[in-house]
Image (tube, rainbow, N blue to C red):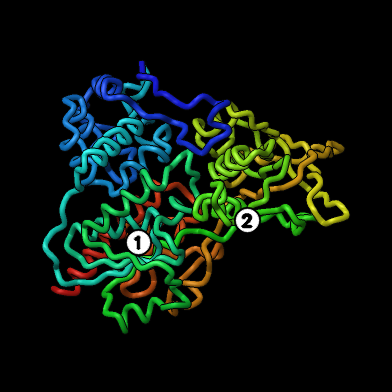
Amino acid sequence: MRVPISEQDPLVRAGNFDEVCLGYTEEEAVAEASRCLNCKVPMCVKGCPVGVDIPGFIAALKDNDIPEAYARLSKCTTLPAVCGRVCPQETQCESKCVKGIKDDAIAIGKLERYVADKARAAGIKPASSAAPNGHKVAVVGSGPSGLTCAGDLAKLGYEVTIFEALHEAGGVLTYGIPEFRLPKEKVVKPEIDNLKKLGVKIETNVIVGKSVTIDSLMEDEGFEAVFIGSGAGLPMFMNIPGENAKGVFSANEFLTRNNLMKAFTEDSDTPIYKPARVAVVGGGNVAMDAARTALRLGSAVTIIYRRSEEELPARKEEVHHAKEEGIIFEMLTNPVEILVNENHFVSGIKCVRMELGEPDQSGRRRPVPVEGSEFVIETDAVIMALGTSPNPLIASTTPGLETNKRRCIVAEEEFGKTSKEGVFAGGDAVTGAATVILAMGAGKAAAKGIDAYIKGKES
């Protein structure tokens, strides 16, 4: 049986932004690691998008050898403390765990978090870089795909510069994921500092497509290759009546104000609307993040999702935490109009009940409206968490860079090669909004592709 992990009491944490999960103690971590069977054919590794040496780091942890466990981790991932907190391990590495066939799977994510946190506290540094090889590579975006690509290239001896549009590095790790899931000072910034120790340079406030272009980086600044990991930051809306009313936000804006600009702190000068009631439309992790953030700001929160709970794309852990904290779920429900008062503020959201029909292209049963089932949920604000698409700025200013009808950059899956010579891409800029670990996997693959490309030019 899995060693349970401590969490803040739901009634307490609903009123603060401190981390929900408190992590394992040394005794608990070693006990959980000791459950690992150390399989000769580790299926868990095959379930990890970045190929972490899971049996290796857990074996070292069994002996409480944190330096060795961290060394095993840092060879494969640049963001272990992040992955240990936000990766959907239950559908990836842990879902492949042999132990999970007749028992609980090993808590791989919680153990990864423990090792990374202990290593940081002990001042243990990541694996060092190879000697400089004299080649320069530019990385666009400092989110998980960009950080991973940069870290892997730096370890190979490349001179890497990351160009970030915002004033702080980290991408979605900084602006998107709330403090109570991913602390910025404690986790994100130290992980980025580790990259800098590898020699990676980070230039903030640089908007590629305006401040500089992909072509100017390559032609004028001497970068031999460019990796585009700019993410998907353009929010989607429903285009229903009333959507332009005061009190309607995208989850992107709402979370950015809170996470990047610290609107949740008492001394913040960032304006944020704190209504009595909030409705969040969507069922993914971003919807859970927005809902749980609004709750902590003092609002009563309802999540509206057009499918059933079984189809919720959010992590089960996040749904469980949201319910524990008192968030209401209106399932099989779809908004059709946002109601507005005389001052043009949101006063409610008109919805219809849904039922599940035949499967759609995603394989999930398609929701269809139930005739005559309209009803109103009274609310003072609506947060749309319906997904995002890539900002078209980079593609529109880069001749020869192919995109598809979803505005995503077209890139080869194996190594991230695009239609433009020397330009690689990965993460949400290619796939649309996905998970942190999938973006990291794409950054890792692109680093291999860039390395092969530059070496091929030399030969």
Secondary structure found at label 1: loop
Q: Name the residue tied to disc 1.
A: 416
Q: Is residue 108 left or right of residue 39?
A: right
What is the x, y in percent for residue 138? 31, 69
Query: In percent of the image, x 15 and y 53: which residue is there?
Result: 128
Numbered mark located on residue 271 in the image: 2
Secondary structure found at label 2: loop
Furthest-bottom residue in this view: 220
Q: Is residue 24 something one can see in this rendering?
A: yes
Of the residues shown, which amino acid type is indicated by label 1?
Gly
What is the x, y in percent for residue 358? 66, 38
Relative to 89, say whether 162 is above or below: below
- The quarter of the picture where residue 81 lies is top left
What is the x, y in percent for residue 199? 22, 62
Q: Quadrant of the image for the N terminus? A: top left
Of the residues shown, which amino acid type is indicated by label 2?
Pro
Relative to 141, say whether 176 is above or below: above
